[in-house]
Each structure stands twice: as structure tokens, then as C-alpha cells.
């Protein structure tokens, strides 16, 4: 099977996760793809294939090295996630191939246009084949492209026994998009000493610095009175919500980049009596991250002080999600060196970039499994303008195979 065929098969399975369910996995439909991958791994001849009750798929590819070489080669893990973002629909995905992209705007459907004037990165794919959406759903290359690339790598390694590699452990996780992908990860059973997530973007990307991350929920209890007699009595929870947001620093995702952190208002709902605001807070620098959390709490405290006597109340709940994995990867520079060499050997210029997001690897690194992130070839994740460079995806299969060779003797 070709890697593109794998990806098309996977994106047609709705695996959207949910922040609301409180279950693990957050949606039962993630098991549909998990069972498909479990079956495919068995058909490929992988060892120790299993699907856990929490929707984690595990498998192992035995080493074909000598006993002496194995002593000096770390057991390598390759990890990708099966779920797609709650930010856009993942149901009835209808992927479409654009052959030899010519650099012009691409009509997707439903009135949506993938325009290089808005998404200039698109121009770097000129001449390549692309996989795009129909304008009504996300594509799901995040991270089913990573899943497909790992599966294709495994198929080719098992069918090419002359290619030397150490032991390889495979894991496909649920709920990464809601920050829970590592929560029930069987680290001991997985068996890897080091690993990579394949969950990045533009080809050549190597990521080992990610955001420190927190979620924040602000609940506002207002005082509702008939508008005709509300003078000096009504405290409208919605207006207080607007006032709260205005107290936060103006660093939002739309005006930050690189190492700059942000506050991101994800949802806002309510009425005069009760309002709820959901945010995420991000920063690469731990001290700045902690300061942003203090600013959030301080804004809530300030408005509580202002409106408490009138009967209104604000409650801020902040929960840390994950931390910057850089400190956990610094003792393992060979992981970055191996990835760079694998890219170069395949004719790709490697680039190390800070992740403006997070991966399962961030949590896994803090759990004791050092785990940087590699590119997939996808772009514009979490929305209808998501697309994948097919040539980059095919190249990533080569890179992963080369990476398994680069690990030989690195222990």
C-alpha cells in the first residue's frame, strides 16, 4: 500500500476528540481507527500488537542487528496521534488530490479558497502534489499523516530485511488534541528508551522546544434584573466578561510568533446571569508563563473586588497542561543530531524550530521518555484550509527509515 492510500483511508474515519466528555478516550469513535491500525499492524507482521482499553495501539518491530550492536543501540519509539481537533469537523472528510500545484488559488468548495496570498507557505509547494479538503471539514493530516508515515515505514522495513535497524516500538495515541494523549500511555509496556513523535508541519522540521501550557476557565455569576428596573442593580455577566478580557495583555495568537506567548480566548457563552470564558495560556519561558497565569488570576481578583458588593462573583480555575520539554532533552543531543543527519541524507535541509503548541512528546519527556517532534508535511492544521504536501509525506517515510539506521551505535 502507498502512504497516500493509507492517509486517505485514515482521514475518512472520524476521530475527533472532545474536551467535554471526561472519558478516556474522550470519544468512542477513536476506537474505529485504532482497531483498523491494530489489524493492519498484525497483517504487516509486527510483534506484540495490542490495543488498550483506553485506545492506545502498541506494536514492536524486532531488531535485526547483532547482539553486540544491540548493546550499543537504543530502543527507538515512533509515536503519532489518531484524534483530530475539536476546532473543526472531522466527519465525512472528502480529501482531494491537486496534481503538480501551479501556485494559483485553489477553490476547495463551499465557498472556501486556499489562497497563497493568505497562506504564503503554499507557494513553497509549487510543482508538488497536494491533498486538500472540500472546504467543509479539516483534513486530519494532523496527525494521521504521522500515523501513515510510521505505518509505511514499518511496512517497508519489514519487507526489506537487508535494511539494518535496532528494535522499534510503535504507539498511536488518542486525545492528543485535548492535551490528554499521554495520560494513560503505558510507558513501561511500550519499551522504548528514546522516541520521536511524528506530529509536526513543514518538511525538515525538528522540534524540541514547546510551549508551557495551561487551560483557564473563568466563571462569572452576574445579577440579573428586569431591564426596565435595572438601574444600579443589574450586573450583566456578559459585560463583566468583556471587561475581564480587556484587562488581559493584548498578546493573542494573531499578533504573536516565534517565542512569544499568548492568551487565547477559545469559547465564550452565557447570559446576564452566568457567563463562562475558556482560555489557553502559552509561553516558552517558564517565568513568563507563570506571570501570565498570575495576570489572569489578578484580573479576576480585581473584578471580584469591584463587583462583590453588588452580588456578582468571578471564579478562575487554572490547570497546567504540559511544560517545555527542552530541559528534558538537553541530556540527549544525539536525538537532534540523528534527526538532522536523517533529513540531510534524504536531501532535506533540517530546521530546528520552537513548537507553538505541544505534543504527546512534551508530557512523555517529563515522564522519562525523551521525545522530540518531527515534521509530517502538513500545513494549516485545525481548520478547513489544512493541506498536505504529498511529496513531503513520501519523503518523510524515507527520513524515518534513515533515522532507524542513524540510531545504530548511539547508546
Image (tube, grey):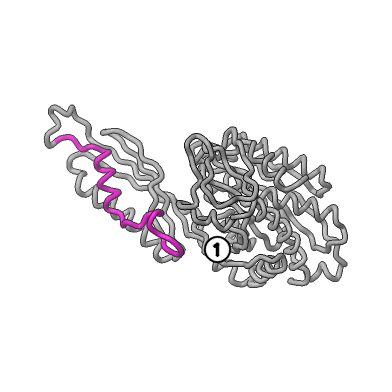
Left or right: 64, with 89 as reference point: right
Q: Is residue 22 visible?
A: no
Q: Is residue 382 above or below residue 163?
A: above
Asked whether 387 or 141 is in front, the reply is 387
Name the element at disc 1: loop
Left or right: 272, with 363 as reference point: left
Could you tell me which residue is drawn at 87 percent across and 67 percent down? Answer: 67
Write down the quadrant of residue 346 in the picture: bottom right
On whether residue 288 falls in the magenta region, the answer is no
Q: Position of residue 209 (x, y in %)?
A: 53, 64
Q: Position of residue 327 (x, y in %)?
A: 54, 68
Q: Is residue 130 above or below residue 369?
A: above
Residue bearing the label numbered 1: 325
Could you tell me which residue is drawn at 65 percent across and 47 percent down? Answer: 99
Q: Position of residue 74 (x, y in %)?
A: 74, 66
Asked whether 275 or 345 is in front, the reply is 345
Write down the quadrant of residue 289 in the picture: bottom left
Left or right: 317, with 6 as reference point: left
On whether residue 257 falls in the magenta region, the answer is yes
Could you tell me which residue is drawn at 28 percent across and 48 percent down? Answer: 244
Q: Position of residue 208 (x, y in %)?
A: 57, 64
Question: Where does the magenta region start and end?
Answer: 233-260
Amino acid at each position: 500500500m502507498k502512504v497516500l492510500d493509507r492517509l486517505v483511508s485514515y482521514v475518512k474515519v472520524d476521530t475527533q476528540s472532545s474536551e467535554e466528555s471526561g472519558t478516556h478516550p474522550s470519544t468512542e469513535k477513536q476506537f474505529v481507527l485504532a482497531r483498523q491500525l491494530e489489524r493492519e499492524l498484525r497483517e504487516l507482521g509486527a510483534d506484540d500488537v495490542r490495543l488498550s482499553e483506553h485506545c492506545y495501539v502498541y506494536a514492536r518491530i524486532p531488531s535485526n542487528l547483532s547482539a553486540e550492536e544491540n548493546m550499543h543501540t537504543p530502543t527507538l519509539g515512533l509515536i503519532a496521534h489518531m484524534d483530530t481537533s475539536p476546532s473543526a469537523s472531522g466527519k465525512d472528510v472528502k480529501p482531494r488530490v491537486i496534481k503538480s500545484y501551479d501556485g494559483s488559488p485553489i477553490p476547495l468548495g463551499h465557498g472556501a479558497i486556499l489562497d497563497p496570498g493568505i497562506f504564503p507557505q503554499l507557494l513553497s509547494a509549487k510543482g508538488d502534489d497536494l491533498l486538500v479538503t472540500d472546504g467543509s471539514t479539516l483534513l486530519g493530516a494532523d496527525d494521521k499523516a504521522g500515523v501513515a508515515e510510521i505505518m509505511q515505514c514499518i511496512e517497508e522495513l519489514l519487507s526489506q530485511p537487508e535494511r539494518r535497524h535496532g528494535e522499534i516500538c510503535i504507539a498511536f495515541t488518542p486525545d492528543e488534541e485535548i492535551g490528554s494523549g499521554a495520560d494513560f500511555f503505558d510507558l513501561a509496556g511500550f519499551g522504548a528508551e528514546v522516541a520521536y513523535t511524528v506530529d509536526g508541519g513543514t518538511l525538515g522540521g525538528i522540534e524540541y522546544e514547546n510551549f508551557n501550557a495551561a487551560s483557564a476557565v473563568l466563571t462569572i455569576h452576574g445579577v440579573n434584573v428586569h431591564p426596565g428596573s435595572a438601574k444600579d442593580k443589574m450586573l450583566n455577566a456578559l459585560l463583566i466578561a468583556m471587561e475581564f478580557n480587556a484587562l488581559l495583555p493584548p498578546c493573542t495568537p494573531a499578533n504573536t510568533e516565534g517565542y512569544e506567548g499568548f492568551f487565547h480566548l477559545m469559547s465564550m457563552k452565557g447570559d446576564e446571569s452566568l457567563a463562562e470564558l475558556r482560555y489557553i495560556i502559552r509561553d516558552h519561558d517558564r517565568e513568563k508563563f507563570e506571570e501570565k497565569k498570575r495576570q489572569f488570576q489578578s484580573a479576576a481578583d480585581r473584578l471580584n473586588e469591584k463587583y462583590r458588593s453588588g452580588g456578582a462573583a468571578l471564579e478562575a480555575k487554572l490547570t497546567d497542561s504540559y511544560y517545555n520539554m527542552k530541559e528534558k532533552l538537553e541530556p540527549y543531543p544525539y536525538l537532534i543530531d540523528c534527526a538532522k543527519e536523517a533529513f540531510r541524507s534524504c536531501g532535506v535541509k533540517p530546521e530546528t524550530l520552537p513548537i507553538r503548541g505541544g505534543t504527546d512528546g512534551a508530557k512523555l519527556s517529563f515522564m522519562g521518555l525523551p521525545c522530540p517532534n518531527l515534521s509530517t508535511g502538513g500545513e494549516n492544521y485545525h481548520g478547513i484550509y489544512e493541506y498536505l504536501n504529498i511529496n513531503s509525506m513520501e519523503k518523510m517515510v524515507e527520513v524515518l527509515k534513515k533515522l532507524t539506521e542513524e540510531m545504530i551505535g548511539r547508546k
